[in-house]
Image (spheres, rainbow, N blue to C red):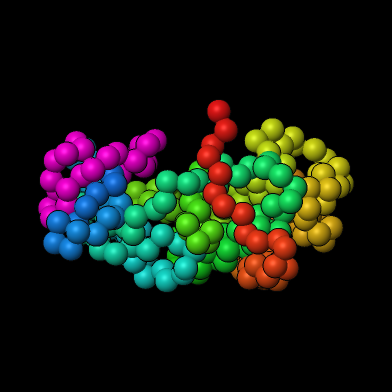
Amino acid sequence: MPLPGEAFAHYRLDAAVEPAATAVTDAFFATDTRRGAEVMLEILRDGATGVERARFATRARRLRAVSHAGVLAALETAPDHCVFEAPTSHPLAEHAGVAIARARQKLCWLAQVAGALAALHAGGVVHGALSLDAITVAPDTTVKLTVFAGGDVTGSPRGDVRAFAAAACELLLGADAADAAEPDLTERLHAAGAPRETAAVIARLRGGGATTSEDLAAALAPFADYAGPSTEPLLPVVPRRE
């Protein structure tokens, strides 16, 4: 496996992405030495089997074809690596449970992620490991979903939707969000700032209910464009609390 400070193709590996990307790949923050651009480089490990290599190539090709502002863009693919635009260093988990005043901003983020998830599924890609740590917040407060080419292909779109609901509960209620019964969870989400109808949708999915990512994105679409009054601006990224 290459190490930070080494070169891979025409990229300089600057630092490893932690934790490790997937069971068959490693990821690095890197610099494209041709253009000086910062990127994220996912590299297939030498011990990968023929099946794993084929799955990597297929998934990388599909990710390259997905074009959505909420998905980290795949810029280049090869049999043994995939190059993505560089993610920011601020995972959405840093905002979990922080201040009810952020509810409208959080709903905007969730709407963007739901749209990204629908675009992935339409492109034949299952995320397989969706969580707040797989979503980063850019300086302009938009969010992007990180999806690795070497990710688990055994998941399902329904599993992604349920993972989204769990992440939504964590974002709105905090890391200690309990597995409350659906009516109680609806009330807790509503008390945290989600409209009651939206809270009911998230609670139902968290409890095992089913819907498509397309329908989920449609349900959250009204929140996709944050348009609060001038006295309620988008709040800046805050550092993770220890």
196 shown above or below 226? above
Where does the magenta region start and end?
Answer: 1-27
For the point 61% across and 54% down, the residue is 235
For the point 34% across and 66% down, the residue is 64
Residue 187 on the magenta segment: no
Image position, residue 211 (x, y; %): 68, 61
Q: Give whichever of 178, 173 is nearer the camera.
A: 173
Q: Give whichever of 192, 1 is nearer the camera.
A: 192
- The reply to whether residue 15 is in sight is yes
For the point 57% across and 52% down, the residue is 236
Image position, residue 107 (x, y; %): 68, 58
64 shown above or below 131? below
> In the rendered view of the protein, which quadrant contains the N terminus?
top left
> In the rendered view of the protein, which quadrant contains the C terminus?
top right
Query: Where is residue 58, by image quadrant?
Result: bottom left
Residue 7 on the magenta segment: yes
For the point 17% across and 48% down, the residue is 12
Left or right: where does residue 125 sit relative to residue 202? left
Image position, residue 129 (x, y; %): 49, 46
Image position, residue 165 (x, y; %): 66, 50
Left or right: where does residue 46 sit relative to residue 27? left
Left or right: where does residue 98 sit relative to residue 70? right
Q: Give whichever of 116, 192 is nearer the camera.
A: 192
